[in-house]
Image (spheres, helix red, strand yellow):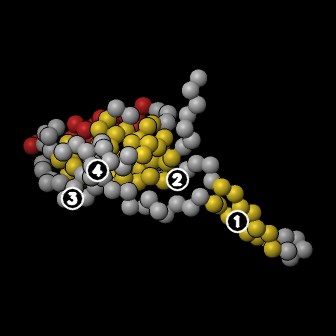
Amino acid sequence: MDNNAYGPVTLDTLTLPFDLEWPDRYDWGDIVQTSDYGAQGEFIVQWNRRQAGRPIHLTGTISQSWENRAGVQALKDKAATNNDPLELTFNGSTYWVIWDRESTEIEAREVLPTSIAYSADEDRMYLTLRFLQVPTPVSP
């Protein structure tokens, strides 16, 4: 099965596991605010709408969202090329993202750990992918 109820999950041309979860989806607030006291003791509040930077962390578990070793390597290769915006399609919506390089952008753990001597491209791994949402790129 390659699709969830909303269609496939893709990152540019790569198809990702259909059952990845986005656990921090609602942790983002559109408004950012700071407050401080001025030199005369007045309370100063500044706020504005965030332009970009929403974290999108997609995760799998030991029981779902598996990818084979070759698929993980394809993701690692894509992450190693540059930091151009990527088109992420998830649950029927499209997001422009870059890799979140302040964290480990790709984590992959074997579902059934095996010795490296017996590893194969078909070995299953569960993923954590970390992105930051950016504005939609402007076409030249």
* Secondary structure found at label 3: loop
Identified by mark 1, the residue type is Thr
Q: Residue at x 45, y 36 (%)?
A: 86
Q: Which residue is mark 2?
A: 54
Disc with the residue nearer the chain's start (1 vs 3): 1
In the image: residue 2, left or right of residue 30: left
Disc with the residue nearer the chain's start (3 vs 4): 4
Measure how far apart labels 4 and 1 are at the Cα level: 40 Å
- Residues at badges 3 and 2 in contact (C-beta under 8 Å)? no
Say which of 113 and 95 sits in front: 95
Disc with the residue nearer the chain's start (2 vs 1): 1
Q: Can residue 135 be seen at all in this image of the molecule? A: yes
Measure how far apart labels 2 and 1 are at the Cα level: 18 Å
Q: Residues within 10 Å of mark 2 (few under 14, many from 20)?
A: some
Q: Which residue is mark 4?
A: 5
Q: Residues within 10 Å of mark 1 (few under 14, many from 20)?
A: few
Q: Quadrant of residue 119?
A: top left
Q: Residues within 10 Å of mark 4 (few under 14, many from 20)?
A: few
Can you tell which mark lies on residue 72? Answer: none
Q: Which residue is mark 1?
A: 34
Q: Which residue is mark 3?
A: 62
> Disc 3 vs disc 2: which is toward the camera?
2
Identified by mark 3, the residue type is Ile
* Percent coordinates x, y for residue 125 in the rendering: 21, 49
* Secondary structure found at label 1: strand
